[in-house]
Amino acid sequence: MDLPGRHKAAIDDPIEELVGWDGSIAYLDRDGVLNVGREDYVKTVDEVVMLPGSGNAVAALRKAGYRIVIVTNQSPVHRGVFTHDDLENMNQAVLDGLLAENPHAHVDLVLYSPYAPWEHSPVRKPGAGMLQVGRQLLSNLTLEVKHQTSQLQHQFDEGRSFMAGDRDADMGAAYQHGVRGFRVDPDVGLAGIVERILNDDDEGDALEI
Ligand SMILES: [Mg+2]
């Protein structure tokens, strides 16, 4: 069974419960949403450049009751471009960057897919596997990744949950997981779209195929 990697934790380590949480999760892509993306991948800590306002946007989502899960495709791991440890350092730099801007920009969970496209993993976006694992961990459910993402049964109330990302794969994952999808301008990042997200009547952007 394919599983995503989890930042500085075993995949099934328990997560602290949040009293009064309504079940809403902000599933956030990383590159082009929180930090500046690069065509040749963000490969080193020095290449982690935060998008202004992303820390404040994450803090605003938390204040609105969302729990925050980063779900990031990181095929360079299996392509041999960088290692899990390199990625851990880069993910930590993103988390530090968010908190440097706003001390309330706490991220609950960072999940990454190390798989390359030719591995056809359900935990690589546009598959919904990483989002499923995030839901299962935060809801303290038994960890299970379904391989037939096209035949998903939506068992959980996702509340106001959404997926925000700058690529078709992010929108596809939102669709497969059955949550609102928001297309992010990678030059602006999450700050450019957070007002729309916080409007519960905004149904998100359509999946363009
Ligand atoms: Mg991206």
Image (tube, helix red, strand yellow):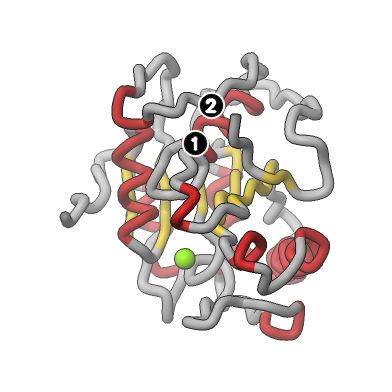
For residue 1, the mark is: none
* Residue under the point 42% across and 19% down: 157
* Residue under the point 76% across and 65% down: 83
Is residue 85 found left or right of 94 in the rendered image? Answer: right
The answer to whether residue 96 is seen in the rendering is no
Which amino acid type is marked by label 2? Val
Assess disc 1: are there few (<14), some (14-19) or many (≥20) residues with their C-alpha within 10 Å of its C-alpha: many
- Residue 30 horizontal/vertical position (percent): 56, 62
**Of the pair 75 and 119, the residue shown nearer to us:** 119
Q: Which residue is mark 2?
A: 145
Above or below, 31 against 198 in this view is below
Above or below, 70 against 56 in this view is above
Q: Earlier in the sequence, mark 1 or mark 2?
A: 1
Q: Which residue is mark 1?
A: 129
Q: Secondary structure at mark 2?
A: loop
Q: Secondary structure at mark 1?
A: helix
* Separation (CA) of disc 1 from disc 2: 6 Å
The answer to whether residue 158 is seen in the rendering is yes
Above or below, 74 against 174 in this view is below
Report if the beta carbon of the residue with label 2 is closer than 8 angstroms to ligand 1: no
